[in-house]
Image (spheres, grey):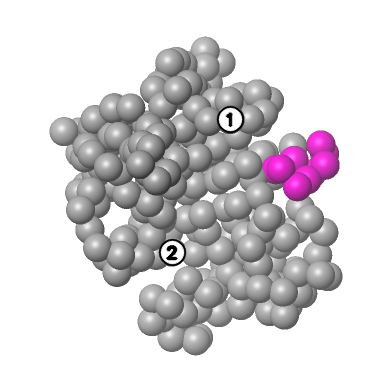
Amino acid sequence: MSNSSAIRFTGIRKTYKNGSLEVPALNGVDLNVERGEYVAIMGPSGSGKSTMMNIIGCLDRATAGTYVLDGNDVSHLDDNALAEIRLRKLGFVFQGFNLLARTDAIKNVALPLFYAGISSKERTRRALATLDEVGLSERAHHKPNELSGGQQQRVAIARALINDPAVLLADEPTGNLDTKTSADIMSLFDKLHATGRTIIVVTHDEEIAHHAARIIRLRDGLIVADETLPHKAEAL
C-alpha cells in the first residue's frame, strides 16, 4: 500500500435495507487518492456518489471492503472513534454553509478546536490565521446574516481547514451561489490545492469539476471513468 495515499478503498460495498429489500449503492469500488490530489466525483442521481462521499467522510460505514484514511484503517471503528477521525482528519464544506447563526465568523471557524480541547487564546489565534488564509480576516466579528453567501462559504471553508485536515471534502460547495461567486470560491479551492491540500469535490456541474485535476465518474455504484485532465497534468 502506498504511504502517500490519503484515501484507499478496496472492494467497498454499501447496501441499504428497505424492509426485506436490499438496495446496493456501491458495488465493490477500488479507489486510491494520493496526498495532494484534487479530485472531483460526479455521477447522475442514484449513481452512488453521495454514498461514496459519506463513507469517505466517515459519516457512514461500508457494508464490506476496507477503507484506509491517511494511513488509518477506519473500516471497523465504532461511532466514537469515527467522530474522532472526522474531527482530526477531515474538513467538510457543504452547500448550505451550516454556520451557527448567532455566532460570529471567528467563533464559527474555531468551533472544531473547542471540541478538540484547544485553549481559547490558541483557538482565536488559529481562527484568525485561517480566516486570513481564505481572505476574510476583516469580517472576523460579523455574524452569518451580516455576510454574503460567498463570504459565508469562505467562513465554512476556514472552519473546515482549522484542524489542518488530511482531506478537505466539499459537497456541491457552490450550489447556493451565483456564477461569479461560484468562480471566486473555486478559485479559492485552486489556491488551497496549490499549497498541497488534498481536496475532494462532489458535484453535478462539469465546470466546477474541471477545476480538479482528476474526475471520477460513477454509475450504478461503480466507477465507470477515472480521468486525469490534460491541462492539469501538464501543470503538475
Q: Are marks 1 and 2 in contact (CB under 8 Å)?
A: no
**Relative depth, front residue between 21 and 234:** 21
Q: Identity of the amino acid at label 2?
A: Asn
Find residue 45 and name its label: 1
Find residue 177 and name its label: none
Image quadrant holding the N terminus, namely top left
> Residue shown at 39%/65% (left/top)?
87
Q: Identity of the amino acid at label 1?
A: Ser
Q: Can you see residue 56?
A: no
> Would residue 147 be found to the left or right of residue 216 on screen?
right
SS label for mark 2: loop
> Residue shown at 71%/43% (left/top)?
175
Q: Nearer the viewer, mark 1 or mark 2?
A: 1
> Would residue 145 be found to the left or right of residue 87 on screen?
right
When the figure is inspected, residue 64 is found, relative to residue 58, above or below; the finding is above
**Relative depth, front residue between 71 and 133:** 71
Q: What is the spatial separation of the Cα atoms under label 1 and label 2, in whole angstroms? A: 32 Å
Say whether residue 179 is magenta: yes
- Please tell me how crowded label 2 is: few (under 14), some (14-19), or many (20+) other residues with Cα within 10 Å: many
Q: Residue furthest left?
A: 1
Residue 107 at x, y percent in the picture: 61, 77
Residue 115 at x, y percent in the picture: 43, 77
Find residue 163 and name its label: 2
> Residue shown at 60%/34% (left/top)?
203
Q: Residue furthest front?
A: 20
**Relative depth, front residue between 154 and 196:** 154
Give, as a single range, the part of the protein colored magenta: 174-182
Say whether residue 134 is magenta: no
- Please tell me how crowded label 1 is: few (under 14), some (14-19), or many (20+) other residues with Cα within 10 Å: few
Q: Can you see residue 152?
A: yes
